[in-house]
Image (cartoon, coloured by chain):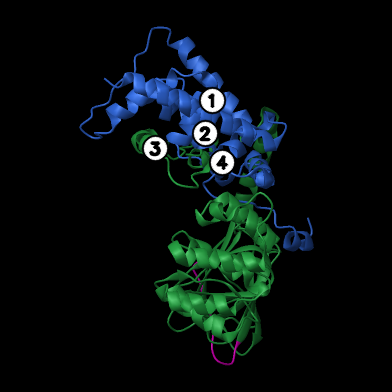
Amino acid sequence: MSAEMYLVDSCVTVFSSNPMSVKAESVHSSLVTAARDGDRAAFGKLYEHHAKMVHAILLARVPRHEVDDLTQDVFLRALRGLKSLRDPEAFGPWVATIARKRAADFHRNHKETVELVEEPAAENFALPEALSVLRVIQSLPETYQETLLMRLVEGMTGPEISAVTGITPESVRVNLCRGMKMLREQLQKEVP
Amino acid sequence: MTDDYLWDKSGPPDPEVERLEEVLGVLGQRKPLEIPPELRRQPVKLWLWATLFAAASAALIAAVWLPRRSRGPECIVLRVEGQPTISSRSLGERARLREGEWLETDARSRARISIGHVATVEVEPNTSLELVRVHPSEDRISLKRGKMHATISAPPRLFFVDTPSAVTIDLGCAYTVEVDGEGNTRVEVNHGMVSIVLDGRESFIPQGAVCVARKGVGPGTPYSVDAPPALVSALGEFDTSSSTTALHTILSQARPKDALTLWHLIARTTGTDRVSVVQKLTSLVPLPEGVTSAEVLQGNSVTLRAWLETICPQAGRHHD
């Protein structure tokens, strides 16, 4: 590359820790390309942008105490397999697929029934109630689980969920509304 | 009640959703990514091992029989005027500057530093700087005081200038960095883009803009080189005191060309001050399609970045 190209063609694109809008997909492409070339900082950015989504997907499927480690595992698998990703702009849906497969692998390798392990409430008094609500969400149709967890647990907005998952905003909104309606109904049934 | 709050946290909060956010938030993702050592480097395919072995052998031979060489590109200093010194030694017409060495110019001397084919730095009189690191992955200078002009022909984020009040990061450009006697830093960009950061606070300085970083405060808000003096003065006051009065002066003086200044102020204001900034900026540069002022007011980085791309496409590419 000539010197002029470097001066004009600024090639590193970075982004914040919040997921991107559809308009900003080219930023992810640049991060993916850089990560493929060995730029671990770029992959770190991809992690920041997508970790919440992956965490929510796993939270819907595996015991809570396994989620953090499996989230790490999903991204390390993504890092190893990055060269197989044909379309860099599809990184979000691609890593989401890895997460779901990893969750399925987890259950295949843990054939015995795995109960949610309740952590001691001494350190976090809110945890028992959180786990109770989580169980209710996990009983909802799969379509609504992930979206609700991204919104209510991870704090992502609907537009952010759409941007990082590749699901249309309209579908995300429907999932959130219907999911929330079902969640309310189920929670009311649980009230003594 | 509408589902706006559930959708994008706009509108009046839904009490039940808020309650669930509060309860479930403890389960959220917080752990940083830990990349194991074996993945920190690019994996090397099997067929390359033979090449690497041969190269390693040649390197070993070279190391034994040839003089030791620097790991990174050579850093050469040329005397332009007067008698610059390197670590208190007069450099003559030309000398090599090594990591850890100090280049100093007095009132009558100037020098030029060439770092391989990556950077050229013109050093003004009364300047003191240290070559911190010269490496294929990073070139770093520490400017203690004085003035330098850098022209960089490397990919972005490979050339850094440490100053007492901030770190400037080259994003592909030519720029001037000046540190005064109190450790305050002034960066003016002649071509391209520079980022200036400290403790997580970052400012983007495009061509034709200036940014001052104050010691103990960090990067200020960038402004156009031809910004109204009243705006520049009020900006200096706002950067150090967050004064609402100063903010109102900035807003009253801002022209369309000062849109980037106002964009930076969005993240540096809250409440009604932020509303005022967004309203003013909207009057100068309309929001891009798909972006609402509600999202901007929430500080949504996606929407902020989209707006930045409209205001300054070059900065938008680097927004973090």
What segment carries the magenta color? B99-109
Q: In the figure, is residue B229 to the left or right of A188?
A: right
Please tell me how crowded label 2 is: few (under 14), some (14-19), or many (20+) other residues with Cα within 10 Å.
Answer: many
Please tell me how crowded label 1 is: few (under 14), some (14-19), or many (20+) other residues with Cα within 10 Å.
Answer: many
On the image, the x and y values in percent for residue B267 come to 50, 61
Residue name at image x 65 percent, y 38 percent: A36
Residue that extends furthest to the left in the rendered view of this protein: A122
* Number of marks in the rendered image: 4
Dot 4: element? helix
In this orientation, which residue lies closer to the viewer: B119 or B12?
Answer: B12
Instruction: Return the disc, 2 or 1, that comes first in the chain's sequence.
Output: 2
Dot 2: element? helix
Which chain did the renderer colour blue? A
B103 in magenta: yes
In this orientation, which residue lies closer to the viewer: A93 or B62?
Answer: A93
Instruction: Give me the C-alpha separation between circle 4 and circle 2.
Output: 10 Å
A44 in magenta: no
Instruction: Give me the C-alpha separation between circle 2 and circle 1.
Output: 9 Å
Instruction: Give me the C-alpha separation between circle 3 and circle 4.
Output: 16 Å
Which amino acid, mark 4? Glu
Which amino acid, mark 3? Glu
The residue that label 4 is drawn on is A160
Q: Determine if marks 3 and 4 fall on one subunit.
A: no
Q: Which of marks 3 and 2 is in front?
A: 3
The residue that label 2 is drawn on is A53
Q: In the figure, is residue B254 to the left or right of A7?
A: left
CB contact under 8 Å: marks 1 and 4: no
Q: Which of marks 1 and 3 is in front?
A: 3
